[in-house]
Amino acid sequence: MKKIKIIGGKTLTGTINISGAKNSAVALIPAAILSDEYVEIDNIPNISDIDALEEILVYLNANIKREERKVTIDSSKIVNKEIPEAISKKLRASYYFMSSLLGKYKYVEMYFPGGCSIGARPIDQTLKGYRALGATVIEEGNKFTIKADELIGNKVYLDMPSVGATVNIILTAVKAKGETIIENAAKEPEIVNVATFLNNMGAKITGAGTSTIHITGVDYLGKCYTEVIPDRIEAGTYVIAGALVGKDLIIDNIIPEHIDSLLKKLEEMGSDLVVGDNYVKISKLDNGKPVNVKTLGYPGFPTDLQQPLTTLLTQLNGKSILEETIYENRFQNVQYLVDMGANIEINNRKIYIEGPTKLVAKEVVATDLRAGACLVLAGLAAEGQTIIDNVEHVLRGYENIIGKLSNVGAEIEIEEYN
Ligand code: EPU
């Protein structure tokens, strides 16, 4: 087990460099096995979710070379075998392997994926996509056996713009016969990253980043090189840290457009942040105006920044309202913020945050990845020593969070215990 300890109240100044996006990298790695040769992926973040995917690659007999941020994956000798539940339940993205294997071999056996416990997170849209392409899905408890004599392109209309279902259907369709059209597709930048990667291998995908994606199946996918885009959620988390306790804090190596929804909210609060070509500079926001925020698919306000943002909302001057429309259980951070002195009321999918309230250090628990990020931010702003338990969740998605925050002046350390 691991705990993070933070002595709050320090001013953060200097530069934080943003790593490659978790939610891109975790899709690119399973996508890599669709290549009939080898691929190179650069700017891979050093986080535990990547280690879990590497475990699956090794299990499937892929040949992997990891040097610094670059991974080379040779899938020419992989073996299509059932991925054990103990591995698949480590993370949500494990089910991208289900689609790559199905797309490549027309047969796969796998278990329900894991992921943060923030809602039910069904996979019905992905299964609907498999069936539309001609596959039979057999469900036995947690286990799925999916097979097809042939995968044949078809039209798939998603009930909601699901990131996972969009990626899964692309992965299944790239080697199918004929054209697949995904309507009401998710538009997240991570999907564009995956489509570009597959196109570099020789796939024929157009429209990624819009709500209609066309995929024309091809027989062969070759070698290629790609880079993981910067992590917009990591970037957004540190931008929020800057608005809480920063002094000219620079969040560097980002695509500011990807966090436009956050930057616009910060401007609405009164922040005088500076937006450069690939960085944002931000200082502590004094006397910030309250805001209303509603989470939506991209380019709307990301659900993944909702919990980190809540910490900042406790410091604004008045009542903010935050509505979570994507997940039904993504407020587990709220009770801990209240314990630390916040004034927050939960009403179904909305929370009402009355600020400003002084935050005081407490012993708290990271119930999930972004709840953990929210509590790290609270610890940075609070008076005294905050101890956050269960931070394995945080390490799944934030590369070197201790080093990055220490470098800009935070008093933060991690402790391992039994
Ligand atoms: N949904 C369904 N059926 C489906 C798929 C989704 O009902 O078949 C619902 C979900 O229950 C949820 C909504 O649709 O209410 C959106 O789910 P989506 O499929 O878009 O989410 P995901 O692909 O499981 C990814 C990220 C999440 C991020 C969401 C939304 C990865 C590995 N995960 O999840 O990231 O919150 O998109 O942007 O890419 C995180 O990084 O902390 C995280 C949870």
Image: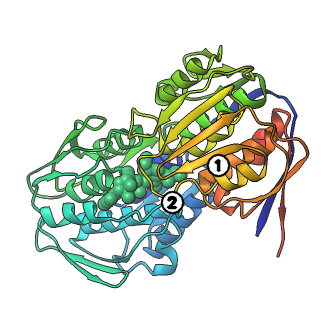
Give residue 318's position: percent from left, percent from top: 65, 28
Q: Quadrant of the N terminus?
A: bottom right
Kind of residue at disc 2 = Ile
Q: CA distance from mark 2 to mark 1?
A: 18 Å
Left or right position of 59 against 412: left
Q: Quadrant of the C terminus?
A: bottom right
Q: Which residue appears farthest toward the bottom when viewing the image?
A: 140
Give residue 235's position: percent from left, percent from top: 60, 35
Left or right position of 233 against 24: right
Q: Residue at image x 80%, y 41%? A: 359
- Any part of residue 84 in sight: yes
Q: Residue at image x 65%, y 13%? A: 272
- Give the answer, above or below, for where 25 lies relative to 288: below
Q: Residues within 10 Å of mark 2 (few under 14, many from 20)?
A: some
Q: Which residue is mark 1?
A: 398
Q: Nearer the viewer, mark 2 or mark 1?
A: 2
Disc 2 CB within 8 Å of nearest ligand 1 atom? yes
Give residue 20's position: percent from left, percent from top: 55, 42
Left or right position of 211 against 115: left
Q: Which residue is mark 2?
A: 118
